[in-house]
Structure formats: structure tokens, C-alpha cells
Image (spheres, rainbow, N blue to C red):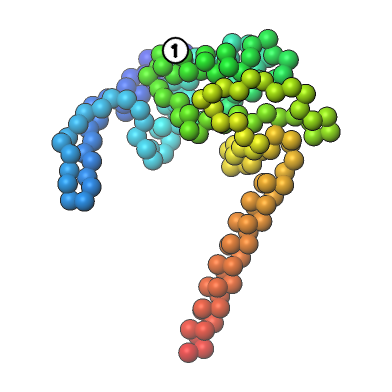
Amino acid sequence: MGASRGVLCDSSAVLSNRYQICRYGGYASKLASFNRGFVQSSGVARPTLFVIFALDLNTLSGSNELIKFADDSTLLVPEDSDTDLETEFNNILAWANTNSMVINLAKTKQPIFYNPRAGPKSLPPAISTIERVTSAKLLGIYIQNNLKCDIYFKHIMTVYSQRLHTQVTQKTRSQFRDAA
């Protein structure tokens, strides 16, 4: 791995000698030690550690692109790539297995982007473990396979409408209290 010894030692301290107790409905499990994964809601530590550990995660083909942001990765494989999507995805699964990491297949999606004027030429073979979708949310933005933005705009308008409704309701309640 391309990280310095100091970074690896600091990372090791965060990932080792951790203990957990699960509590539910008045019951508690025994204290258990674990040394894998990242602490949820660990702020900067979890995404930063992922970036450090993922330094050696690369595509097999120079024409394919792997975009890493915090603890998310996006694989882009163009139609004319010399390495197909399934081979690239199996490479990522092998990397995750080697590094004792788990790919959340329930969150893994496969949109196939195409020029809306030309339409999709030919679809690549489906990967059985990945859901093929017409749109996906990437870093908070909905991206559609036909490169249009109507789903994203609808989402923004829905959020705006909900917030406006909340503000109007709060203002009306405030005016009602002030009048009483």
C-alpha cells in the first residue's frame, strides 16, 4: 500500500482494540472485541481511512475510470473499453475481498448512459448481482441514463415545496399564538 508507516500506525490504532456491546429492550450482549470495518458516524476518520486503504484500488483498463469520494466509489466503463464492466467489477470485488472489505451489493446500481438523440446502441450483458436502473443518486445528484435532469429537478422542487410548507405553517402558528 502507498501510505507511510506513520499513517498506517495511526490507522491501526483506530481500527484495533475496539469493543462493542449491543443493547436492546433492557438486554445487553457480552462485551465483544472487533478489529474490522469503520466506526459509523466517525466523522472524518472513516472516509479518510477508506481513501488511504483504497490507494491501490485501480481499474484494469486505462480507458475505464474509477472515481473515489469519501467511502463511495463509482466505476465508469465506456462502450468501447477493452475491459468489460463485469471484469472490472469482479476486479473490485477481488480487491475488497483481499482487503477484508465488503461491497454493499444492495446499494450497487448499474445505469447505462446513452445519448438521448441516438438512443442506446446495444446494452452490455447484465451482471446478476447488480440492479440495472434508469437513474441513480451520485453525491446527492440524480443522474439519468438518458442524461436528462427531470428527476433531479422534480426532487429539488419537492424538497423546496416541503420546506416552504414548513415555513408557512410555522409562521401561521406563530401569528396565531401572538394574536391569542
Identify the image quadrant of the N terminus: top left
> Height in image: 89 above or below 117?
above
Asked if one can make out residue 26 in the rendered structure from this viewpoint, the answer is: yes
- Horizontal and vertical percent position of residue 91: 52, 14
Q: Residues within 10 Å of mark 1 (few under 14, many from 20)?
A: few
Residue matched to label 1: 1
Residue at 80% over, 34% down: 116
Q: Secondary structure at mark 1?
A: loop
Residue at 45% over, 22% down: 52
Residue 147 position by quadrant: top right
In the displayed structure, does residue 154 sit left or right of residue 94? right
Residue at 58% over, 17% down: 86
Q: Nearer the viewer, residue 56 or 48?
A: 56
- Horizontal and vertical percent position of residue 124: 67, 20
Question: Total of numbered circles in the picture?
Answer: 1
Extreme residue toward the right, this view: 117
> Height in image: 145 above or below 76?
below
Asked if one can make out residue 70 in the rendered structure from this viewpoint, the answer is: no
> Height in image: 7 above or below 27?
above
> Height in image: 164 above or below 121?
below
Residue at 58% over, 62% down: 163
- Horizontal and vertical percent position of residue 26: 17, 51
Residue type (three-letter) at the residue carrying disc 1: Met
Q: Nearer the viewer, residue 137 or 171?
A: 137
- Horizontal and vertical percent position of residue 151: 68, 46
Extreme residue toward the bottom, this view: 180
Q: Nearer the viewer, residue 88 or 129?
A: 129
